[in-house]
Image (cartoon, grey):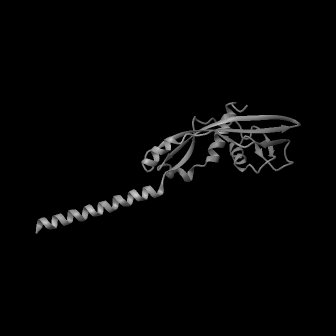
Amino acid sequence: MAVARCVRQTLRIAAILAVVALSVASALFLIGPTSNLYPVAPLQPLAVQFPGGKACVRNPELADELAILESSRIFEIVPAGQARKVITLHPREDLPVCGTPILFTWFTFGVASTKIPIESTFSFTVVENGVASKHQCVLQGERRVSRLERLYSPFRSDVRTWGGILASEYAAGRVR
């Protein structure tokens, strides 16, 4: 009798552990990993805020590029007619990325982390007093993909990260 009761208790505990393990596994599968963008190298801050001065943007319909330029704080973006500098943004060109490393993250249900190098060419033309100069920069970052990135996701913004990288490249003199 005592042995049967011990076996029943063991089976109950095993069933509870199986249900908990299955619940955790299915929750991990349904939630899935997320990703955040990080700079590849340490960022160099601008020596002064808005070193490029006041400027207006000719084509604000390129919302992502405009947001990156604004978050870089290279120029103080003002409405049209309030600045001598006029910036024409060009569409950002993202270089192709190999997605193979993401497979490892997916096979481990997002537990294993993956780093994917990302490069994006950011360019714009500045016209001041009838003289046009084209500025171009290759922004380098890395996308980290894992379940743990979900914890940082509310605090990260790709636009702010790209803006920080652009400002760092500008401060280092790599915007040509």
Q: Is residue 118 above or below residue 150?
A: above
> Residue 141's image quarter?
top right
Of residues 138 and 165, which is closer to you in this image?
A: 138
Extreme-bottom residue of the structure: 1
Quadrant (top left, top right, bottom left, bottom right) of the C terminus: top right
Residue 173 screen position, x and y as percent: 70, 30
Which residue is at a point 72% across and 50% down the rendered structure image? Answer: 63
Of residues 67 and 22, which is closer to you in this image?
A: 22
Residue 154 screen position, x and y as percent: 56, 53
Of residues 96 and 146, which is closer to you in this image?
A: 96
Q: Is residue 15 above or below residue 151?
A: below
| Drawn side of residue 112 relative to residue 154, left or right | left
Which residue is at a point 79% across and 38% down the rendered structure image? Answer: 125
| Drawn side of residue 130 relative to residue 70, left or right | right
Which residue is at a point 85% across and 47% down the rendered structure image? Answer: 82
Which residue is at a point 10% across and 69% down the rendered structure image? Answer: 1
> Residue 10's image quarter?
bottom left
| Drawn side of residue 69 relative to residue 6, left or right | right
Residue 6 screen position, x and y as percent: 16, 64
> Residue 133's image quarter?
top right
